[in-house]
Image (cartoon, rainbow, N blue to C red):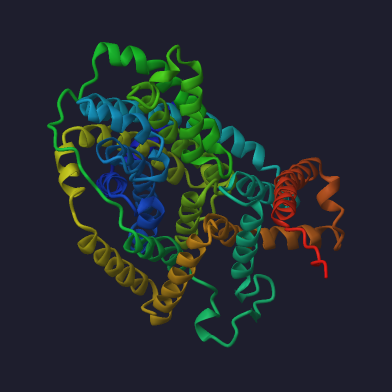
Amino acid sequence: MVHELLYGFGVALQLPNLLACFIGVLVGTLIGVLPGIGPVGAMSILLPITFGLSPVAAIIMLAGIYYGSMYGGSTTSILVNIPGEAASVVTCLDGYQMARKGRAGPALGIAAFGSFIAGTIGLLGLMLMANPLASFAVRFGPAEYFSLMCLGLSVLLYLTHGSILKGLVMAGAGLFLSLIGQDIVTGKVRFTFGFFGLQDGVGLVPMVMGLFGISEVLLNLEQPAERTVLSTKIRHLLPSREDWAAAAKPIGRGSLLGFFLGILPGGGAVISSFVSYALEKRFSRHPERFGEGAIEGVAGPEAANNAASSGAFIPLFSLGIPANVVMALLLGALMIHGLRPGPLMITERPEIFWGTVASMYVGNVLLLILNLPLIGLWVRILKIPYRILFPLILLFCLIGVYTINGNVFDIFVMILFGIVGYGLRKAEYEPAPLVLAFVLGPMLEQNLRQALILSDGSARVFFTHPISAACLSISLFLVISGILPEIRRRRRMRRENAVPTSSPKS
């Protein structure tokens, strides 16, 4: 493993890849600092730029945007009480209270150092687990892969915020959209509804830019968040010995918890940070201090969300299955560059895997160096008014989506999905299951058809193979256990809202 890691550093430290890493983490931090954009929106906007890069540089840059945004999100949570990224919501609870008490410096410092430590632990876990898992996954056939992808979608739906029924609707819509275009076996065009621009299918980039970029702009223009940046001078960015003593265990627990939750489909940084906060509050001898400026409430969640971002790469590189919507974008980027993530990629294209792993360590060092000295710059950027920021985002979206194919039709697709995404957000439908199902759709269909061809059309193949049967059984259990409580809740609400009617006596 040491030899492979040294090889990875040789790849990551090549000038184009090092520059891609620097740009990625810098843009990621900026995206994390600015509320209302998020890593998904930023990656979808910048995805067209990566087409001119080598596959290694493209993945290094996109990965840098992802884990860089985790670093940057804590800045707004602590200084403005507005999370720059969804995973930093919990940091607001104690980080902002620390800032109000004049301890913004230690809060920012422990968030940065905790993120660096967690990122390093996450990378060690990634190196230790990805290769053995990939070696095991080589034995998988089409039936196992189909069932495993079904399990991934089921776990995502089970952990989706809000209604699992809405999640199922979104996943179904994503699977249908993935069928548009040419049949993967016969080559015949299907579900284009007479639109020539749909013969090659719906473009991932226009769809994601619309769902996450344009819709986010529309939502923020509707109700722009009020930002009041603390005007007090930030001092003592280096945590004291007492701060380290209080934060050391939360950082360790958050790192391990976040890493393992990050591996799960749908687990991700958001759930990791919430679970870490609840865990630290439970373990604390003074739980009443949480919400009043406890440094443990900053250290644990920040470590958890950064470790989760490393853990999410394991199913992507080992199995070719994205754990969250960001990994779905990375999967799409790899496929656009002609690469197929999975167990064979680690051995056949080691420069991709080990180069990305080494670049993440380099990126974590760069983030630690950049974040603390540039706090003043991030504070000034926070004061940029939305009326300037959002037109620039729209301009980047329009230019980016047009440069992919030079096709005006893609712009209309992006605008359409922007309006659809806005409506979905207003109706409290999560777009993440749609994107994941859309990305997994072609692989699901391909493995389903291959499995049926190999078994002469018999569906028994999915239940006679132990791994496939186990995955499908767990999937069914998760979906049913998620739907039944919701059906009971809706029935109870209907009974409670029912008003008994009686005819008036004459």
Q: Classify 479 as above or below 211.
A: above
Q: Classify 320 as above or below 193.
A: above
Q: Residue at x 33, y 67 (%)?
A: 397
Q: Classify 280 as above or below 146.
A: above
Residue 288 placement (x, y as % from top left) = 42, 19
Q: Residue furthest left?
A: 233
From the viewer's perspective, is 458 left or right of 114? right
* Number of disc labels: 0
Q: Nearer the viewer, residue 262 or 93?
A: 93
Quadrant (top left/top right/bottom left/bottom right) for the C terminus: bottom right
Q: Nearer the viewer, residue 445 or 451?
A: 445
Residue 151 placement (x, y as % from top left) = 68, 47
Q: Residue furthest front?
A: 506
From the viewer's perspective, is 427 left or right of 122? right
From the viewer's perspective, is 430 left or right of 157? left
Q: Residue 418 falls in which quadrant of the image?
A: bottom left
Q: Residue at x 21, y 22 (%)?
A: 238
Q: Nearer the viewer, residue 386 or 262?
A: 386
From the viewer's perspective, is 459 left or right of 444? right
Residue 459 placement (x, y as % from top left) = 85, 57
Q: Residue 356 falls in which quadrant of the image?
A: top left
Tell me, yes or no, if residue 54 can be seen here.
Answer: no
Q: Residue at x 40, y 39 (%)?
A: 89
Tell me, yes or no, if residue 368 can be seen here.
Answer: yes
Residue 150 placement (x, y as % from top left) = 69, 51
Q: Residue at x 27, y 63 (%)?
A: 390
Q: Residue furthest bottom?
A: 194
